Image: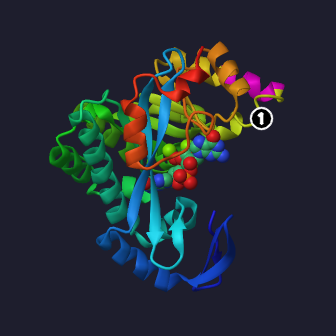
């Protein structure tokens, strides 16, 4: 996560580059112009059905090709985008681009998949969200059923009253609604009880230690069956090993996403992956 340092300082760092402090106001100005200039792009991470081994979806993840700092990851700029409100125009672009790209894959004759888009608190409380989503669907011509909004538990609880209404509206339009990073908040069960969700994404902190932590195995197994009992599609995030995959299969977890199956990749690469009838990744499924 990027952290602020002092009033106008902002720490930017990546593993490949020494940490450096940049001026926060400059970065904001650059973000504003970057949105207009097309400096942002999306990567797509595949989601596989654990039984069929087929790609059934992708999560769209935003990156910033900064003119001088190079490629920045969301952890380095989403916080600032939220704080400043720039997440609204940025999120609007993400939504449009994700729908446009997914429709382009469909038009190319590839198997239709669901595209997941992350929505943060500031976007969710913006009055223009429904209009933005509707515009993205209309402009792309993609059916609503292929769009999934990923919402976090804290976002839902913060906005509990409007959230249910807004989510009902989205469900009427035909969208899918996922609870992202499930299990790390303070009101996970309240969220499941209160909101019209279609999917539950188990936070990767519960997946990470599955290979050697018996408690995590119990928790993951319980979350999968809880989700199933509620009629939700359960997705495990952050799956990195074959052992984790095998365990999740034994729990009858429906969908997996993680570095073991594929890292977030360019649209071009993802399109090729989707186009292969027998992907190299089929090797992962017996
Ligand atoms: P998230 O929605 O939970 O997305 C999953 C994050 O986990 C991604 O990081 C992804 O690259 C990473 N990941 C996937 N599989 C694995 C794995 O096997 N191991 C590990 N260690 N990590 C894995 P990324 O792309 O850096 O995004 C971080 C967060 O930034 C996202 O978390 C999401 O909250 C936010 N974000 C990304 N794109 C957008 C966007 O377009 N809009 C908004 N509002 N937030 C976004
Ligand atoms: Mg997500
Ligand atoms: Mg997540
Ligand atoms: Mg997250």
Q: Position of residue 14 (x, y in %)?
A: 64, 66
Q: Main secondary structure of the magenta part?
A: helix
Residue 239 lies left or right of residue 270; in this view the side is right
Q: Is residue 88 above or below residue 20?
A: above
Residue 222 lies left or right of residue 146; in this view the side is right
For mark 1, give the secondary structure.
loop
Q: Is residue 126 above or below residue 68?
A: above
* Magenta extent: 214-221
Q: Position of residue 155 (x, y in %)?
A: 49, 49
Residue 194 lies left or right of residue 250; in this view the side is left
| Residue hosting label 1 | 209
Q: Residue at x 64, y 34 (%)?
A: 239
**Residue 191 lies in the magenta stretch:** no
Which scheme is used to colour this image of the protein? Answer: rainbow
Q: Residue at x 75, y 22 (%)?
A: 218
Looking at the picture, tell me which residue is in the foreground, 102 or 127. Answer: 102
Looking at the picture, tell me which residue is in the foreground, 241 or 221. Answer: 241
Looking at the picture, tell me which residue is in the foreground, 31 or 150. Answer: 31
Q: Residue at x 47, y 85 (%)?
A: 26
Give the position of the N terminus as an image quadrant. bottom right
Residue 88 lies left or right of residue 16; in this view the side is left
Q: Is residue 151 visible?
A: yes
Looking at the picture, tell me which residue is in the foreground, 3 or 285. Answer: 285
């Amino acid at each position: 996560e990027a952290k602020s340092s002092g009033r106008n300082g902002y720490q930017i760092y990546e593993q490949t580059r020494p940490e450096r402090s940049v001026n926060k106001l400059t970065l904001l100005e650059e973000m504003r112009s970057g949105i207009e200039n097309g400096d942002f792009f999306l990567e797509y991470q595949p989601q596989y059905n654990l039984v069929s081994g087929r790609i059934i979806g992708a999560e769209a993840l935003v990156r910033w090709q900064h003119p001088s700092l190079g490629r920045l990851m969301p952890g380095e700029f989403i916080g600032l985008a939220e704080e400043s409100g720039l997440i609204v125009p940025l999120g609007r672009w993400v939504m449009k681009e994700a729908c446009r790209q997914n429709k382009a894959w469909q038009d190319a004759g590839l198997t239709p998949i669901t595209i997941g888009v992350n929505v943060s608190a500031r976007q969710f409380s913006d009055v223009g969200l429904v209009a933005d989503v509707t515009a993205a669907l209309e402009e792309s011509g993609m059916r609503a059923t292929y769009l999934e909004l990923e919402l976090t538990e804290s976002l839902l609880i913060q906005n509990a009253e409007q959230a249910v209404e807004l989510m009902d509206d989205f469900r009427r339009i035909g969208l899918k609604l996922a609870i992202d990073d499930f299990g790390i908040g303070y009101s996970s069960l309240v969220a499941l009880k209160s909101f019209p969700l279609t999917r539950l994404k188990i936070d990767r902190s519960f997946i990470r230690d599955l290979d050697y932590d018996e408690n995590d195995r119990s928790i993951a197994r319980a979350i999968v069956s809880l989700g199933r009992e509620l009629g939700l599609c359960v997705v495990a995030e952050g799956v990195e090993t074959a052992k984790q995959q095998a365990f999740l299969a034994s729990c009858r977890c429906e969908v997996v996403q993680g570095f073991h199956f594929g890292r977030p990749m360019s649209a071009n690469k993802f399109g090729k992956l989707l186009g292969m009838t027998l992907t190299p990744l089929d090797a992962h499924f017996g």
